[in-house]
Amino acid sequence: MSGTSLDGVDAVLVDFSSGTPQTLATVWLPYPTPLRDQALRLQSAGSNELHIAALLANDLAQLYAHAVENVLAKAHISPEQVTAIGCHGQTVRHQPNAGYSLQLNNPALLAELIKITVVADFRSRDIAAGGQGAPLVPAFHAEVFSSSSRHRVILNIGGFANLTDLNPEKPIQGFDCGPGNVLMDAWIDAIQGIQYDKGGSWASQGVISPSLLEKLMADKFFHSPPPKSCGRDGFNMPWLSQFLDGGERPEDVQATLAELTALISAQAIQQWCGHPDEVFVCGGGVHNATLMARLQHHLPHCRIASTDFLGQPPDWVEAVAFAWLAWRAISRQPGNLPAVTGAHGPRILGAIYPA
């Protein structure tokens, strides 16, 4: 998995033979700076972008291959023992209303390099069936995190935030809430030249700006009903910059962006999920103490904790989810939830590139 945060590649080795996913090994490889910069540039239109995108897809396949090699070596597993690789690719455009979501990848090259069958392109079939193609992880969340007695919400805060509502008395639902870490990361990179606000320490030094927050919260995406999904196409530095007058203290902007993520997530839970007993958080946002404190502030009567408490370390949940989706594809089982994505029905997700 390489997500919208553009920080690197998460690789997990997962055993499904018992019916419950067992993670055997994990590896994270950072994006080299030139690769990250190129992926960021491709978030918007530019000259010769088809050629640049194809070359970046090749570079990504090489990096994915290294990640696979590392995780196999860590677990002392040979490629012959692995059924398949689930490879999501790097999202550069997400336009489901226009009929596509584009993840850069070269699964044929990855299969050639590693000699393991690759499952890729998970989103296209759901979009072809009238869905958003996202979020896809709620089906996995339902499989591993559901309780027959507790109303749970799983909140994934990566580059973007999405939730899964696991109410034992109602059908599963899930959708994107809006920006997760993406705006906070972009802002601290623009001001300080670093990729993320470790622990939310910079945000903790600022003061939330009510006027700026009001402008940000006015975006129609936050007020539209699910099913819905979003990406860097809608929330990015140009989107943020239109609301700034240049007189703001940078740390106040950061504090306000942390508040934005916490508030849109809390309001989405309150509006569409009712009153859950507990919210379990995964993704990089779980390490942002300022963000987590603001989330608890807005949900004072709800237990908020990491998915660690459910047996899935928060940094690896999404990678395990795409291993699970690959396993579903190889087993010819549907991987989407139509009530979540808006697709016309259950669909087997992913294109298979045999070894």
Image: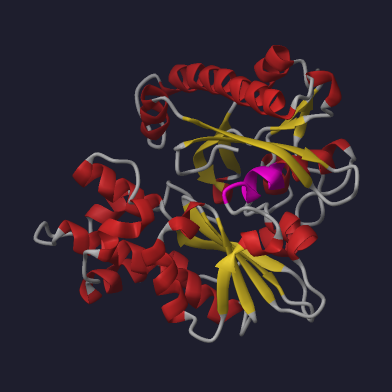
Provide the residue span drawn in magenta.
315-322
- Residue 281, picture quadrant: bottom right
Residue in view at x 13 percent, y 61 percent: 249
Q: In the image, is 263 to the left or to the right of 54?
A: left
Q: Point out residue 116 in the picture as x, y percentages from the top left corner.
A: 78, 21
Residue in view at x 79 percent, y 59 percent: 143
Nearest the viewer among 242 and 69 is: 69
Q: In the image, is 277 to the left or to the right of 252?
A: right
Q: Point out residue 208 in the picture as x, y percentages from the top left corner.
A: 25, 71
As displayed, is residue 257 above or below residue 324? below
As displayed, is residue 329 above or below residue 75? below
Q: Point out residue 33 in the picture as x, y percentages from the top left corner.
A: 36, 26
Asked if residue 38 can be seen in this view, the reply is yes
Q: Furthest residue to the top?
A: 112
As displayed, is residue 258 above or below residue 110? below
In the rendered image, the quadrant that contains the N terminus is: top right
- Residue 254, picture quadrant: bottom left
In the rendered image, the quadrant that contains the C terminus is: top right
Q: In the image, is 116 to the left or to the right of 261?
A: right
Residue in view at x 89 percent, y 50 percent: 19
Residue in view at x 48 percent, y 84 percent: 300
